[in-house]
Image: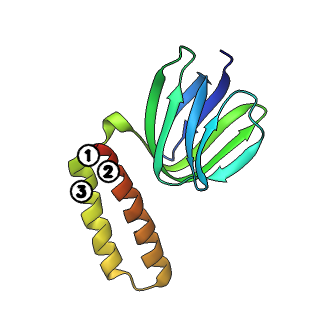
């Protein structure tokens, strides 16, 4: 099967780079499956799992992302995510602690902007916790 170049980067590190068969992207409009020769598109990301199929027909990697954007162009797919973590590295106790801290930030928020930021972060953490529990 034909492949295309895929790269996923977060502020902390590059999580993936290489040829892939397809990638499922949790776009803000809904999940998108990117295949070779996909039409150019740019979209924002919602909290969810990026699933990467390698050139051998199997899932090579699953990564939880939240925030950022995906860009499909002639050279492939690039995802720049605000948060990106390999699914196997997510620990329920760490997510629970982050949720407690974010709930506290939400309670202490003094502006609409701070409240919206905390609510969005908490939504992403809830998605991450649901993923860990399943």
**Helix, strand or loop for disc 1:** helix
Tell me if residue 29 comes above or below residue 100 in the rendering: above
Please provide percent x and percent y for residue 35: 67, 30
Q: Are marks 2 and 1 in contact (CB under 8 Å)?
A: yes
Q: Which quarter shows the N terminus?
A: top right
Residue bearing the label numbered 3: 96
Q: Disc 2 versus disc 3: distance between alpha carbons? A: 11 Å
Q: Is residue 44 above or below residue 113?
A: above
Q: Which marked residue is nearer to the observer: mark 1 or mark 3? A: 1
Q: Callout 3 environment at 10 Å: few (<14), some (14 to 19), or many (20+)?
A: some
At 51% from the left and 47% from the top, the residue drawn is 11
- Where residue 56 sits: x, y (%)? 53, 13
Q: Which residue is mark 2?
A: 130
Give the residue number, with chain letter if any, for mark 1: 133
Is residue 122 or residue 1 the one in the foreground?
A: 1
Q: Is residue 33 above or below residue 70?
A: above
Question: Residue 20 appears in which quarter of the rendering?
Answer: top right
Residue shown at 33%/34% (left/top)?
Answer: 88
Alpha carbon separation for disc pair 2 and 1: 5 Å
């Amino acid at each position: 099967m034909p492949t295309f170049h895929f790269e996923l980067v977060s502020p902390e590190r590059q999580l993936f780079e290489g040829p892939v068969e397809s990638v499922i992207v949790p776009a803000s409009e809904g999940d998108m499956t990117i295949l070779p020769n996909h039409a150019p598109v740019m979209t924002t990301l919602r909290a969810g799992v990026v699933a990467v199929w390698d050139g051998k027909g199997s899932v090579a990697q699953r990564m939880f992302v939240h925030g950022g954007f995906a860009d499909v162009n002639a050279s492939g797919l690039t995802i720049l995510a605000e948060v990106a973590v390999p699914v196997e590295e997510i620990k329920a106790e760490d997510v629970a602690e982050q949720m407690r801290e974010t709930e506290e930030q939400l309670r202490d928020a003094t502006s609409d902007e701070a409240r919206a930021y905390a609510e969005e972060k908490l939504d992403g953490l809830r998605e991450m916790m649901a993923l860990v529990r399943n």
